[in-house]
């Protein structure tokens, strides 16, 4: 037998804590397979289920408090940081804002289960000035549900997962290569897709200085502010003369005919 299972049994607690911590900090390495695995090991008596859940909750909560604090003190600049270290925060910021606006703090109970939203939700809670006690209550509950659901799944189906682990261990290096290769391909694909999106966006981008020069020169420019209501609450500033139209309503509601240049801004 390869060292895979003995390694997990010997270092499972440490691996679990740091793996969950790193994922919730924004690095795209999913924790779900590991949570199910340690749950299965607990089911066959090799690990302690309560310790596994406790360590996972502590790791995720530590990371979430860090991001919440950054959002509170640094504002929306934190989202720019997330755009640099994550693979797809661009498309999920608006979705997270919509979820927060509709459900408020209780959305933290389930947001860890929604791919792409978790990384943005905790700094956004700080940006919109959600109170710390309210954030801690709902976030800790949501983390406990998230960690508990997957570890308990592994615990309940421990026999089946244990057989899969034994089979994976029997594959030895092949299993590790396939796992690492699959994860690498996924990350590279997401990175390439995001770089292509940013490149396409940059082609039609205008800087604030260029826009100001156009306005000072008296050029005909239609400025549309498509920021979310939560963004405006956090930073209540608007370019003079801009139309305030949510992005969901912009298409079909704005006349872009004529010789006017249209400038849309969302942050």
Image: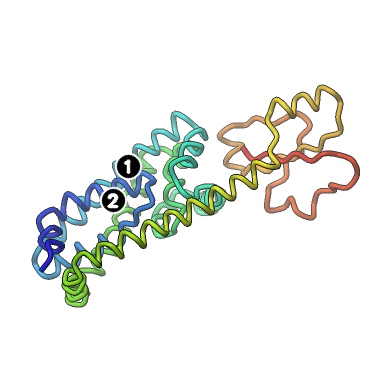
Residue matched to label 1: 63
Q: Residue at x 22, y 49 (%)?
A: 17
Q: Residue at x 28, y 58 (%)?
A: 147
> In the picture shown, does residue 11 fall above or below 85?
below
Residue matched to label 2: 20
Relative placement, left or right, of 122 versus 145 is right
> In the picture shown, does residue 145 fall above or below 236?
below
Q: Earlier in the sequence, mark 2 or mark 1?
A: 2
Q: Quadrant of the C terminus?
A: top right
> In the picture shown, does residue 86 fall above or below 240?
below
Q: Give the quadrant of residue 180.
A: bottom left
Locate residue 81, reporting x and y percent. Answer: 47, 36
Element carrying mark 1: helix
User: Distance between the Cα atoms at labels 2 and 1?
Assistant: 9 Å
The label number, if any, that marks residue 116 in the structure image:
none
Q: Residue furthest top?
A: 216
């Amino acid at each position: 037998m390869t060292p895979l299972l003995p390694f997990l049994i010997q270092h499972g607690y440490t691996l679990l804590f740091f793996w969950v911590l790193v994922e919730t900090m924004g690095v795209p390495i999913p924790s779900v397979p590991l949570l199910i695995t340690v749950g299965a090991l607990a089911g066959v008596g090799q690990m302690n289920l309560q310790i596994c859940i406790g360590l996972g909750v502590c790791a995720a909560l530590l990371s979430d408090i860090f991001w919440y604090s950054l959002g509170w003190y640094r504002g929306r600049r934190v989202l720019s940081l997330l755009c640099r270290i994550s693979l797809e925060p661009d498309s999920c910021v608006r979705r997270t804002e919509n979820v927060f606006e509709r459900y408020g703090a209780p959305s933290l109970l389930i947001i860890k289960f929604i791919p792409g939203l978790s990384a943005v939700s905790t700094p956004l809670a700080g940006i919109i000035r959600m109170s710390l006690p309210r954030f801690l209550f709902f976030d800790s509950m949501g983390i406990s549900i998230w960690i508990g659901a997957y570890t308990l799944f592994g615990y309940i189906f421990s026999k089946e997962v244990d057989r899969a682990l034994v089979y994976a261990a029997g594959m030895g290096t092949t299993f590790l290569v396939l796992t690492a290769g699959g994860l690498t391909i996924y990350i590279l694909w997401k990175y390439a897709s995001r770089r292509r999106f940013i490149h396409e966006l940059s082609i039609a981008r205008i800087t604030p200085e260029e826009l100001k020069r156009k306005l000072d020169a008296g050029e005909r420019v239609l400025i549309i502010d498509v920021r979310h209501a939560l963004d405006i609450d956090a930073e209540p500033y608007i370019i003079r003369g801009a139309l305030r139209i949510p992005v969901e309503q912009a298409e079909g509601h704005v006349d872009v005919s004529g010789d006017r240049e249209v400038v849309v801004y969302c942050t």
